[in-house]
Image (cartoon, coloured by chain):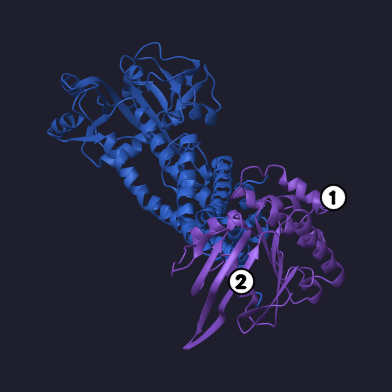
Chain colours: A blue, B purple
């Protein structure tokens, strides 16, 4: 016997090139759609991970542009002004605060870095509090400094790779010509920490001849009201508060325009593909008017014909949709590279994250829109009368 | 579907009027006739005489403008009753098998799949095995896995006949079944139809231009200007 599914699928094979072109259209739409949705999810997850990996939710620094400071910090630069170290205890005493850590960010020009030199970012950190903020740090080699005055350095994964450093090597702080011994190299974190060189806070203060700090990292208690703390910190004179939630929102706002554009393109691609589906199925119905009429003389009800034609749409959309999702998964890394080239700032890790849930969601969207497109041709086919198929005169 | 008196179809004053602009054309003009179970009735006549229209009405492919039609004693059309597409489909699938001049086989389905096609939509109880039985009976077993494009016109019509009979209809309606065939193939199809009528007792209603085919039936009805004149 033959099933209705077999009849529908064999009908599609009649005009192979037309069916193939329609399938390609659906496949491309599906590819764009799932990649875009994957980017939406992946970018936000990666950004969240980067920010969560900061270890603290708020930073307090001397007044200046907070985003510039945050960006500089993320990129290993220094804040614009300095804070008295006594401020650390004052902030730590607040009820919402779980932990605080003082940081001195310094940037030195290194003539040997890259082509024509570059900025080397040094983080002066407090051995007692900073590692606790970064529990996910794992050492590839060595460990933290012996004490908070040691002339030692811990290098991020990329910083060590770039300079080809091993534990035990000596590095020279640019501009200052102070030697530091590399005592630890971190595993890759996929964040900006990978490019940073960590030095004990007191050591960096001594090297820079500064007894202050640039930043206080604040980790808020689990159920504390972060906005309330933020507002209270804004009251501090000459202090600026950078909330990573705000930073995240700002970055998300910046990319939302690009995201909307891509989404519009995806929707247009989807619509074009669906017009292709309507065209293919409608043409196929018009070419088979007589056959459809004959099916009705055989006992097929209008609803049978409707579902037969609808099944053809379903097959086209399923095959095209699955192929597009498959391509998106296979070429996710390529999409990742392209997105990184386009965006001014991209967090570490996977930017286009496609999982089974997202794949199923995309397939559901493709099938939903496809089935909607198939209604008209299927309805038209269902209305064909047997007599339409009989042309011989009597 | 037949009653005890053996009447398959009974038409009384069947009329079909078409409108072409303001002009009214009586394609069928008050035809009354009775077709009994096991009859082989041939309709002949010039083009435009109304033979196909009459067979379409008898085969419940469309509603008449007026008149009555009983099917095995059951009133189908009459008293101005208009049947919808679903009701007509139910009657057709229970009673009729149709074959046409152009075969209308699905080109992407094999011979066997084409014969089995009606069963995908409606299957009468007890028709299991009919596909292979009919293919064997019509000498098409060796072609069952071929596509329609790979067989001759005569073979295509045999496949169409098998497809029309797969749900064991009471009446086979054949509209110019040999119109696209050469003399030899036409004769073969004629023999198949005669055999089905004689050995299986199948009621056959056939429209034909071919005088040799028309003579195969036990009854010959000539159509002229929408009216039926029995001459056989």
Tell me whether marks 2 and 1 sit on the same chain.
yes
Which of the chains bears the disc numbered 2? B
Closer to us: B188 or A9? B188
Which label number is shown at residue B80?
none
Quick check: B147 left or right of A99? Answer: right
Q: Single out the mark in the foreground, 2 or 1.
A: 2
Quick check: B177 left or right of A225? Answer: right
- Residue extending furthest toward the bottom: B22
- Residue at 65 percent of width and 54 percent of height: B169
Q: Mark 2 highlights which residue?
A: B33
Which label number is shown at residue B142?
1
| Residue A140 seen anywhere in this rendered image of the structure | yes
Query: Whole-percent x and y of residue A175?
Result: 41, 32
- Residue at 44 percent of width and 21 percent of height: A154
- Quarter of the N terminus of chain B within the rendering: bottom right
Closer to us: A241 or A102? A241
- Dot 2 or dot 1, earlier in sequence: 2
């Amino acid at each position: 016997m033959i099933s209705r599914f077999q009849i529908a699928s064999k009908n599609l094979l009649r005009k192979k090139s037309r069916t193939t072109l329609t399938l390609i259209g659906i496949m491309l739409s599906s590819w764009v759609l799932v990649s875009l949705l994957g980017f939406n999810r992946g970018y936000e997850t990666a950004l969240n991970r980067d920010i969560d990996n900061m270890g603290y939710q708020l930073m307090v620094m001397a007044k200046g542009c907070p985003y510039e400071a945050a960006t500089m910090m993320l990129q290993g630069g220094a804040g614009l002004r300095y804070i008295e170290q006594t401020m650390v205890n004052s902030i730590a005493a607040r009820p919402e605060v779980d932990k605080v850590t003082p940081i001195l960010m310094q940037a030195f020009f290194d003539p040997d870095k890259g082509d024509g030199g570059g900025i080397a970012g040094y983080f002066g950190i407090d051995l007692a509090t900073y590692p606790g903020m970064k529990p996910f740090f794992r050492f590839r080699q060595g460990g933290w400094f012996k004490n908070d005055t040691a002339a030692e350095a811990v290098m991020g994964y990329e910083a060590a790779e770039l300079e080809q450093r091993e534990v035990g090597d000596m590095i020279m702080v640019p501009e200052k010509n102070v030697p530091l011994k590399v005592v630890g190299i971190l595993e890759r974190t996929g964040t900006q920490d990978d490019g940073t060189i960590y030095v004990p806070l007191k050591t960096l203060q001594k090297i820079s001849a500064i007894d202050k700090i640039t930043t206080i990292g604040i980790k808020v208690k689990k159920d504390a009201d972060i906005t309330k703390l933020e507002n209270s910190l804004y009251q501090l004179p000459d202090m600026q508060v950078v909330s990573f939630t705000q930073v995240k929102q700002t970055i998300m706002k910046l990319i939302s325009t690009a995201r909307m554009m891509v989404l519009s393109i995806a929707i247009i691609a989807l619509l074009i593909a669906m017009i292709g589906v309507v065209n293919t199925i409608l043409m196929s119905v018009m070419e088979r008017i007589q056959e459809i009429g004959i099916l009705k003389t055989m006992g097929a009800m209008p609803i049978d014909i409707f579902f037969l034609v609808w099944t053809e749409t379903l097959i086209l959309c399923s095959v095209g949709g699955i192929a597009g999702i498959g391509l998106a998964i296979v070429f996710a890394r390529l999409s990742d590279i392209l997105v990184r080239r386009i965006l001014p700032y991209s967090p570490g890790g996977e930017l286009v994250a496609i999982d089974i849930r997202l794949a199923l969601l995309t397939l559901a969207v493709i099938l939903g829109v496809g089935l909607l497109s198939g209604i008209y041709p299927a309805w038209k086919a269902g209305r064909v009368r047997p007599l339409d198929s009989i042309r011989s005169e009597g | 579907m037949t009653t005890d008196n053996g009447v398959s179809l009974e038409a009384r004053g069947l009329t079909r009027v078409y409108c072409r602009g303001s002009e009214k054309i009586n394609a069928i003009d008050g035809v009354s006739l009775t077709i009994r179970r096991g009859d082989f009735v041939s309709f002949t006549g010039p083009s435009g005489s109304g033979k196909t229209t009459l067979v379409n009405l008898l085969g419940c492919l469309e509603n008449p403008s007026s008149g009555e039609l009983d099917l095995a004693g059951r009133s189908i059309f009459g008293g101005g009753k208009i049947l919808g597409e679903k009701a007509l489909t139910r009657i057709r699938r229970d009673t009729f098998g149709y074959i046409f001049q152009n075969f209308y086989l699905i080109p992407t389905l094999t011979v066997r799949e084409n014969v089995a096609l009606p069963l995908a939509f409606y299957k009468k109880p007890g028709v299991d095995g009919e596909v292979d039985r009919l293919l064997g009976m019509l000498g098409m077993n060796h072609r069952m896995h071929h596509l329609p494009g790979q067989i001759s016109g005569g073979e295509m019509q045999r496949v169409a006949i098998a497809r029309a009979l797969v749900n064991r209809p009471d009446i086979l309606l054949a509209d110019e079944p040999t119109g696209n065939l050469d003399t030899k193939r036409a004769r073969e199809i004629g023999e198949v139809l005669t055999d089905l009528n004689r050995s299986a007792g199948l009621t056959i209603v056939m429209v034909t231009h071919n005088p040799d085919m028309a003579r195969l039936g036990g009854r010959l009805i000539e159509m002229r200007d929408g009216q039926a004149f029995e001459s056989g």
